[in-house]
Image: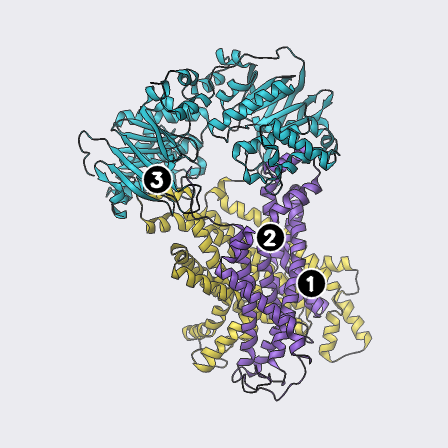
């Protein structure tokens, strides 16, 4: 490998423009971007979806989707312009001088080959090391990324590892040949918050020890606050602002950065309201198990929800927080009877929803409604938005014309243009679709609204708007809400009370402020400690005078 | 070991399927006008009703339908398929004589179409939208749209009648008295055209699936990971994409096993091959339902056996099978 | 309308549509151009094509007009193809929808039946059906439909399995919608496009199956069918190979047209954008 030019930055991107194929929503993925990564620093490139941040990573690696090509500018790595290198020369650089870690650990590894073999491949491509030497190096790498039991991990297939473990394998692979630059494209986005914390610490630690430069792509300001030495903010393919992390996070100069930071929910919980009200929804001893394997199978039993007892006081919002697999979504689906709980009672007013037959539940369905997570999957693509909202009332016998008129009112209520009722879902943005989903749920005037991760698929600025809307509606309509989320910042923002779930059981419950200030259960404490950038206050930053 | 167990479990699960088939077919045949005895009598050139009644008793045809079904199934368990009316021999014997020809034909067609389809599919996917892709995809479509019997006939016209390179039909030179290697070569020469004819339709299917599968796999995340490691495109195809892309192909072998046996009926008729398919055709024409049923039973067993093998191969290719479900 | 425009921009799909329209025109014009029975004697047997201006595709070994048989054969192929496909699609969707939506025991039973049909070589089953019920054109058509549905059922089931867990379907259940309405009004329209595309495969196979039956003399002998004509030409293959060759080309072009239209539909319904937008 060529030695770095002494003194100069490790990676310097000069006036880079990258063209998109015709027919895309804009002409350029990147326009006139200039950045530098110094040796031994972590540069976080942050932006919302469509900002071009991932294209930036792709351009440095020269791994762009077909039809996307650099148009102008230079990408100088250790003094060489990567855009001018031959494909063969790029292959010698990839994996050796520049390592890369991707977002999705579940799909980034070949499912049919052993993990050790896939790491060893890096050595086989770039070195002439012997088989046994490679084996020793791979084992040392797995040790370095702290995989428990590296010897068996060597022989494991990807599906035998957890998401966090796979991401460690990806990091080991990227670091195998001690690259001078590591590109990490949203490496922790797909991971649970506690795993994310550990992976971020690992990247930071290895980067320090090796003095490596890191180009870290993320959408999450919390992660930025956690790991960045310097920050570059992008919007619509342009660089908005760049500078030392403390400056950008503490005293953002660009309006866009300010707006983004202001949209990050602060971890400081709101004051609880509606304390002491009578519960409108009471769960007692609710359990749900899954059996896999079928009649001939070995029948693994998973306790998705175990013995959950909870009260939702009227007019308040109860947050159910937990990581993936904690059973929070299963619990929500039991309440609306998309799933049938095996034990326990779900009391809504005088009715025990858990005991109702299918038919009887259909009669009661309007009393508890649900807002779903995925703004793209939760609306039938073949129905007009107004029809989707009118569907519920029409099923209950409201004449179609009246239901459609009501749909227009609901559109206005959730902040959509009432004239848009005739459009199809694909003509709306993600945030607007979530509003349609909300209007659909509200059309039946439910006593309880269940929101299953309603903002987790949205960009942070859109997320802030939807959260504000939910809060506003709760006050205006006196909604009682069960709010499922994995994001403690969001929970702090909107929930009066929280219940923390782990492995199907509620481990702690109480007013949000009390739980956050003085968590009793060790798991709650671990969750809170893992929230990225918890020491940083977005409110202060957004309010700080411009530098 | 787990893979074998899983495959065995699937094999066991195909027992009810087989029962369903046999019961269904048996009931279907109850609807057929005329029975074995009628066929026998016709074969013998007619006879008096008393003989017919006696024969009916002999074959158990005077019993109730359910009792007959029970007896029928019990006989099948012992692999007793009854007696063929037209050949005057046990059906099992007739089938055993014909089976090797069909296995050889279908086997060589399978190898040809699988290997050819894999290769052409890879080439087409790697040269997407350039001339090799266009050529291969067009040929694939044409093969798919061609009736196999017509392909066979045109092959005979060209290679046997015009060029005189290959025999126009038959399994081997009759009365050639060939043995050992010479006989094997003779049979091989006779099977070139039939195998190609049967293989072409399936070649078209396999190459289409392989092309789509390659395109899909090459767009997956782990291929991007391999590129980020600095791996060359050939290495990626060989070491990462191929095995993943073969998974749907292997599944297809199982799904197409029945179709391939069905296709051999026509091909064997075109080339006058003394195989199972030709036997099926003859038994339909001569209304020898006992034999026809026996052939269907044996074919179903063959398809189940092929699927068992497919399960084993799939399990070896994909480590997730042993862990999952 | 975007669909139509996307379809028409694809030259292969356009070719397929042209071929199909051509076959349709041939089928419709048959009684106008050839008012006589196509199976009746038209002239001296085994006249080569273009030798006699009145019989421009020549005659077969029984002296029947090949051109007339080709024109009438188009009617048979299209009719059998369409009706058999409709039967197969109807059974397949019903079985697949119920199995995929309800799962559990219903799925287990229906899939066993489907598996049984797939374990039987379809052409052999067709032979059995023809042997039992005879070979009138209606029987043959229904029989072809009966052996062709399992793949449709599997496809529909797979679509239903993914769609029934989609959040928009869950939303309908949360609204209190009944099963029948969810299946027919919410899921089916979304599950239909791949099934419609697959219908082209079913139709292509149906046409080929009928021609194979006819070639083996097991289809309706009283109807002019391309397969029949190929079979009739076998005896004179050595010298008058055109008798078999001409109807073969007709089958090829028809099936090619069906396949191309199917592929064109598929491409128009799923425009595989070979670009990824920045994230």
Q: Is residue A66 above or below residue A263?
A: below
Question: The chain drawn purple is chain what?
Answer: C
Q: Nearer the viewer, mark 1 or mark 2?
A: 2
Q: Nearer the viewer, mark 2 or mark 3?
A: 3
Say which colour chain B has: yellow
Q: Is residue A546 above or below residue A434?
A: above
Residue A71 place in picture, x, y as percent: 31, 44
Classify residue B57 by image quadrant. Answer: bottom right
Letter of the chain that mark 3 sits on in the rendering: A
Letter of the chain that mark 2 sits on in the rendering: C
Q: Is residue A539 above or below residue A240?
A: above
Quadrant occupied by the C terminus of chain B? top right
Q: Which mark is residue C195?
A: 2
Closer to the camera in the image, A66 or A488:
A66
Q: What residue is shown with label 1?
A: C142
Q: Nearer the viewer, mark 3 or mark 1?
A: 3
């Amino acid at each position: 490998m060529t030695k770095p030019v002494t003194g100069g930055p490790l990676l310097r991107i000069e006036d880079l423009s990258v063209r998109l194929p015709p027919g895309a929503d804009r002409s350029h993925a990147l326009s006139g971007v200039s950045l530098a990564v110094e040796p031994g620093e972590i540069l976080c490139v942050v932006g919302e979806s469509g900002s071009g941040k991932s294209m930036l990573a792709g351009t440095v690696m020269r791994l762009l989707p077909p039809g996307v090509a650099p148009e102008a500018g230079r990408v100088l790595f250790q003094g060489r312009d990567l855009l001018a290198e031959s494909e063969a020369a790029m292959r010698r650089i990839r994996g050796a001088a520049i390592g890369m870690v991707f977002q999705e650990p579940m799909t980034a590894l070949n499912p049919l080959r052993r993990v050790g073999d896939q790491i060893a491949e890096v050595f086989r491509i770039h070195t002439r090391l012997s088989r046994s030497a490679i084996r020793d190096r791979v084992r040392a790498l797995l040790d370095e990324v702290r995989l428990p039991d590296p010897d068996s991990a060597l022989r494991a297939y990807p599906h035998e590892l957890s998401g966090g473990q796979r991401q460690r394998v990806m990091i080991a692979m990227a670091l195998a040949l001690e690259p001078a630059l590591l590109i990490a494209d949203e490496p922790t986005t797909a991971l649970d918050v506690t795993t994310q914390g550990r992976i971020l610490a690992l990247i930071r630690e290895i980067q320090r020890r090796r003095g490596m430069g890191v180009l870290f792509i993320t959408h999450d300001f919390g992660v930025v606050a956690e790991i960045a030495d310097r920050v570059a903010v992008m919007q619509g393919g342009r660089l908005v602002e760049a500078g030392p992390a403390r400056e950008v996070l503490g005293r953002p100069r660009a309006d866009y950065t300010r707006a983004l930071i202001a949209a990050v929910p602060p971890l400081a919980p709101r004051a609880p309201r509606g304390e002491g009200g009578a519960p409108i929804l009471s769960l007692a001893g609710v359990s749900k198990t899954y059996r896999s394997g079928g009649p001939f199978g070995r029948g693994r039993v998973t306790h998705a929800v175990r013995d959950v007892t909870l009260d939702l006081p009227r007019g308040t919002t109860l947050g159910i927080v937990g990581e993936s697999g904690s059973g929070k979504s299963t619990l929500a689906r039991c309440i609306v009877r998309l799933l049938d709980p095996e034990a326990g009672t779900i009391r809504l007013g005088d009715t025990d929803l858990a005991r109702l037959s299918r038919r009887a539940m259909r009669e009661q369905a309007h009393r508890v409604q649900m807002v779903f997570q995925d703004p793209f999957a939760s609306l039938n693509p073949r129905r007009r938005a107004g029809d989707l909202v009118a569907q519920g009332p029409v099923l209950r016998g409201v004449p179609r014309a009246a239901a459609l008129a009501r749909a227009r009112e609901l559109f206005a209520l959730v902040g959509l243009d009432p004239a848009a009722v005739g459009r199809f879902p694909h003509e709306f943005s993600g945030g607007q679709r979530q509003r349609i989903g909300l209007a659909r749920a509200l059309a039946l005037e439910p006593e309880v609204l269940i929101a299953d991760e309603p903002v987790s698929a949205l960009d942070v600025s859109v997320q802030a708007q939807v959260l504000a809307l939910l809060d506003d509606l709760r006050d205006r309509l006196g909604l009682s809400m069960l709010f499922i989320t994995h994001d403690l910042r969001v929970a702090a923002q909107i929930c009066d009370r929280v219940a923390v779930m782990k492995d199907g059981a509620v481990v702690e419950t109480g007013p949000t402020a009390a739980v956050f200030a003085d968590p009793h259960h060790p798991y709650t404490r671990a969750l809170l400690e893992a929230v990225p950038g918890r020491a940083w206050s977005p409110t202060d930053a957004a309010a700080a005078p411009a530098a | 070991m787990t893979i074998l167990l899983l495959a065995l479990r699937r094999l066991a699960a195909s027992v009810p399927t087989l029962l369903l088939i046999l019961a269904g077919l048996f009931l279907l045949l109850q609807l057929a006008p005329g029975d074995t005895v009628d066929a026998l009598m016709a074969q013998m050139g007619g006879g008096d009703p008393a003989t017919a009644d006696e024969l009916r008793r002999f074959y158990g045809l005077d019993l109730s339908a359910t009792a007959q079904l029970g007896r029928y199934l019990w006989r099948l368990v012992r692999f007793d398929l009854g007696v063929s009316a037209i050949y005057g021999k046990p059906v099992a014997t007739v089938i055993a004589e014909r089976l090797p020809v069909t296995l050889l034909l279908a086997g060589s067609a399978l190898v040809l179409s699988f290997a050819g389809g894999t290769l052409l599919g890879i080439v087409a996917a790697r040269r997407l939208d350039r001339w090799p892709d266009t050529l291969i995809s067009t040929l694939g479509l044409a093969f798919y749209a061609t009736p196999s019997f017509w392909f066979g006939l045109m092959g005979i016209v060209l290679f046997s009648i015009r060029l005189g390179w290959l025999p126009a039909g038959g399994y081997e030179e009759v009365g050639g008295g060939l043995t050992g290697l010479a006989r094997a070569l003779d049979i091989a020469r006779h099977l070139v055209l039939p195998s190609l004819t049967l293989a072409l339709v399936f070649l078209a299917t396999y190459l289409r699936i392989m092309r789509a599968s390659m395109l899909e796999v090459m767009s997956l995340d782990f291929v991007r990971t391999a590129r980020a490691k600095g791996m060359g495109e050939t290495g990626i195809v060989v070491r990462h994409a191929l095995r993943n892309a073969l998974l749907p192909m292997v599944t297809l072998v199982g799904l197409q096993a029945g179709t391939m046996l069905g296709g051999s009926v026509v091909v064997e008729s075109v080339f006058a091959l003394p195989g199972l398919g030709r036997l099926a055709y003859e038994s339909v024409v001569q209304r020898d339902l006992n034999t026809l049923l026996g052939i269907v039973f044996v074919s179903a067993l063959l398809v189940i056996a092929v699927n068992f093998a497919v399960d084993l191969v799939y399990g070896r290719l994909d480590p997730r099978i042993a862990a999952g479900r | 309308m975007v669909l139509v425009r996307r379809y028409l921009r694809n030259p292969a799909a356009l070719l397929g549509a042209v071929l199909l329209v051509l076959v349709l025109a041939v089928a419709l014009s048959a009684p106008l151009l050839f008012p006589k029975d196509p199976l009746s004697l038209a002239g001296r047997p085994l006249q080569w094509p273009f030798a006699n201006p009145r019989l421009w595709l020549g005659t077969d070994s029984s002296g029947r007009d090949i051109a007339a048989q080709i024109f009438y054969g188009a009617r048979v192929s299209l009719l059998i193809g369409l009706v058999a496909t409709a039967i197969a699609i109807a059974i397949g969707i019903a079985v697949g929808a119920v199995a995929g939506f309800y799962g559990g025991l219903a799925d287990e039973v229906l899939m066993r039946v489907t598996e049984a049909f797939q374990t039987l070589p379809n052409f052999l089953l067709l032979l059995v059906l023809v042997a039992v019920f005879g070979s009138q054109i209606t029987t043959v058509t229904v029989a072809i439909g009966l052996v062709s549905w399992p793949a449709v059922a599997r496809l529909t089931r797979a679509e239903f399995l993914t769609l029934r867990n989609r959040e928009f379907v869950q939303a309908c259940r949360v609204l209190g919608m009944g099963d029948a309405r969810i299946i027919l009004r919410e899921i089916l329209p979304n599950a239909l496009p791949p099934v419609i595309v697959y219908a082209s495969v079913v139709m292509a196979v149906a046409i080929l199956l009928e021609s194979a039956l006819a070639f083996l003399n097991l289809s309706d002998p009283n109807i002019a069918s391309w397969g029949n004509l190929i079979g009739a030409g076998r005896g004179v293959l050595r010298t008058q190979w055109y008798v078999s060759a001409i109807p073969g080309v007709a089958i090829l072009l028809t099936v090619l047209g069906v396949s191309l239209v199917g592929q064109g539909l598929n491409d128009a319904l799923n425009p595989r954008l070979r670009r990824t937008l920045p994230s």
